Amino acid sequence: MYYTLLILLILLVAAERLAELAVARRNTRWALSRGGREHGRGHYPVMAVLHVALLAGCLAEAPFRPFVPALGLPMLALVILSQALRWWCVAALGRRWNTRVIVIPGLPLVASGPYRWFRHPNYVAVVVEGIALPLVHTAWLTALVFTLLNAVLLTVRIRCENAALAGAAA
């Protein structure tokens, strides 16, 4: 029964990802039409594969792990909170939010919403979700592998994003 609920949760997260991609496609067209430049294309496919692997890993590992309510329920709460933070980021950035690194020269940095406190709050959501989602059903190996690979990827991504933003401000 708990595995069935996990499948439902993973399907909901996958649907959320598809909604993100739809918003990102629309925002990409808008940004490019205003002179936006894409940076870091090389790491984008790796990021996409890693995020699909997170969902697949949860489904593959969970049948071999017990559901532990004392762990699973707080992790579910963190998954929900990470989704809320992600969409708060989307709302704060508006048309400038994207899954790609696209910067429109001359626009100031957004300093509203969660960007008042964190430079990269969307990545906080990604990190929390990457740990919490697998642990909803005690898939600790998926959580560990995703977190380690994601740390490497985020190092590249954040450097790319910071450089792109610095270049646009210059």
Image (cartoon, rainbow, N blue to C red):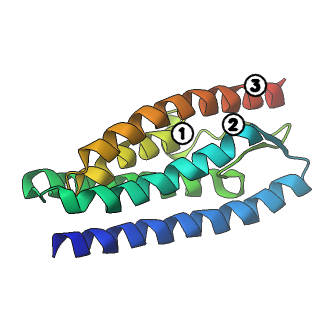
Q: Which mark is residue 109?
A: 2
Tag 1 or tag 2, which sits nearer the N-term? Answer: 2
Q: How many marks?
A: 3
Q: Is residue 135 visible?
A: yes
Q: Which mark is residue 166?
A: 3
| Label 2 neighbour load within 10 Å: few <14, some 14-19, many 20+ | few
Q: Residue at position x 82%, y 60% from top?
A: 30
Q: Are marks 2 and 3 in contact (CB under 8 Å)?
A: no
Tag 3 or tag 2, which sits nearer the N-term? Answer: 2
Label 3 is placed on what type of residue?
A: Ala
**Disc 1: which residue:** 115
- Measured Cα–Cα span from mark 2 to mark 3: 10 Å
SS at mark 3 in the image:
helix
Along the line of sight, the residue nearer the viewer: 93 or 55: 55
Q: Residue at position x 38%, y 54% from top?
A: 57
| Label 3 neighbour load within 10 Å: few <14, some 14-19, many 20+ | few
Q: Are marks 2 and 1 in contact (CB under 8 Å)?
A: yes
SS at mark 1 in the image:
helix
